[in-house]
Amino acid sequence: MASLNPSSWFRSRLSKLWEASIDGHVVSLAWSSPLGLIAAASADGPIVLFDARTGHSRHTLAGHGFGTACVAWSADGKYLASAGQDGKVRTWDPATGTQIKEMPGGAAWVERVAWCPTANLLASAAGKKLRLWNLDGVMLREFPDHPSTIMDFQWKPKSSVLASTAYGKLFFWDAQAAAATTQPKPMREFSWAGSMLALAWSPDSKHIAAGAQDCTVHFWVLKTGDDLQMSGYPTKVRELTWDATGRYLATGGGPTPCVWDFAGRGPAGSTPVQLEGHQDNVNVLTYQRQSPLLASGGDDGLIFLWQPDKQKNAITQVKHNAAVSQLAWSADDRQLAVGAASGEVVLFSVAQ
C-alpha cells in the first residue's frame, strides 16, 4: 500500500479538507476505506456515515438508546457493527443505512465490539460477558464469565486469538476453536494485581501492553511471559498505540505522551522520549498504519503530529475549538479524521 516518502515527514502539515458535525460528543470514529465512509458515533446514540471524500452525510443510523459506545468496521471494511448502553450489539447495512441484526450483549451496557482480522467474526464485551457472533448475528459462543467487568479486549494482529482483561487477569482465547466447543478455556492467562483499562498488541505480536487505573503501564513478553511495569504517569492510562514496526509504544496518561523503545533489551531501565506541547491531558494517540507519524489529540483541542524516533519536537500542529476525543488514519496514511467532544468531525490531509 502506498505511503508518503519518509524523508518528507519533516515538511508535512495538516491541511483541512472538510468539517461536518453530529449531535453530541464523538465517542467513536471508524474509517472504511473500501467504502469511502467514516462512521462517527455520538454519545447521545445516533451514528452518522460520512462520505470521506466530500464530508457529506450518507446516512444517519439510529444507533443505541441511552448512547452508543463503540463502532467498528470489519477487516474488509464492508460491515459495520455497534455497541451501546441499551445492552445491544447491532450490525448495519452501510449501503441503505438500515439495521441488519440486533443481538443481546449479555448486560445492560455493551462497552465494546471488534471484528476478527482474519474472518468475519465479531466479538462483544458487556459486563462479565464476552460473546462471539457470525455475520448472521448468530452467537457462536459465550466465553466463561470473567471474574469482574471486562475492561477491554483486543484481537491479535492477523490472527483469531483474542485477549481480554478484567481486574487482575489477562486472558487469551482461540476464537475459532472456541466456536467449535461448548466449554472453551483460555489458551493462556496472566495475573497482575491491578485494574487494566486498555490493551494493545504490538504489530509483530511479540508484546501486549496494558494501561492501568493506578497510573501505570504494564506489558508482557509473549514468548516468555516476562512482564514489566512503567510507572509515574499523572493520570490513569487509557491511551496506547504501537508504531507499525512494533518497536515503539506511545502512551498517554497525562498531558505529555511518552514513547518507549522496545529494541534490543527493551525499555527496562530506560527513559522514554517525552513529547511536550499539549497544555492539557491527551485523550487519544494513534500511529499511522504503515508509516512513522504519531498523532495526538487532547482536552486542549490541540492535534499534533510527531516522529518520535527522529525528534522530540512536533512536526506540525493545529488547534480545534473543543476537546479532541477521537482520531483515525486512512488506510494509506495520507488523511487523518478527527472527532471532537462538541460533535465536529474534521478531515485533514497530511500535505507537504
Image: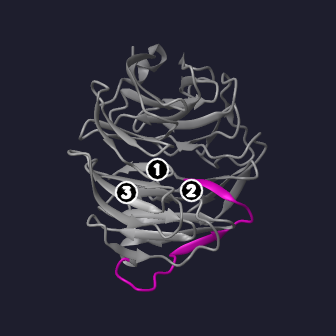
User: What range is drawn magenta here?
Assistant: 179-199
**Residue 62, position in %: x, y?**
36, 47
Dominant SS of magenta comes to: loop
**Residue 5, position in %: x, y?**
36, 23
Q: Quadrant of the C terminus?
A: top left
- Describe residue 326's horizontal placement relative to residue 298 as left or right: left
Q: Residues within 10 Å of mark 2 (few under 14, many from 20)?
A: many
**Residue hosting label 2:** 208
- Describe residue 327's horizontal placement relative to residue 274 as left or right: left
In front of the other: label 1 or label 2? 1
Q: Earlier in the sequence, mark 1 or mark 2?
A: 1
**Residue 210, position in %: x, y?**
62, 54
Looking at the image, do the residues carrying marks 1 and 2 touch, with CB atoms under 8 Å apart?
A: no
The alpha-carbon separation of the residues under discs 3 and 1 comes to: 22 Å
Front-lying residue, 198 or 126: 126
**Element carrying mark 2:** strand
**Residue hosting label 1:** 70
Residue, far front: 65
The alpha-carbon separation of the residues under discs 3 and 2 comes to: 14 Å
**x 60%, y 59%: residue:** 151
**Residue hosting label 3:** 158
Q: Quadrant of the N terminus?
A: top left
Specify the quadrant of the image occupied by residue 345. top left
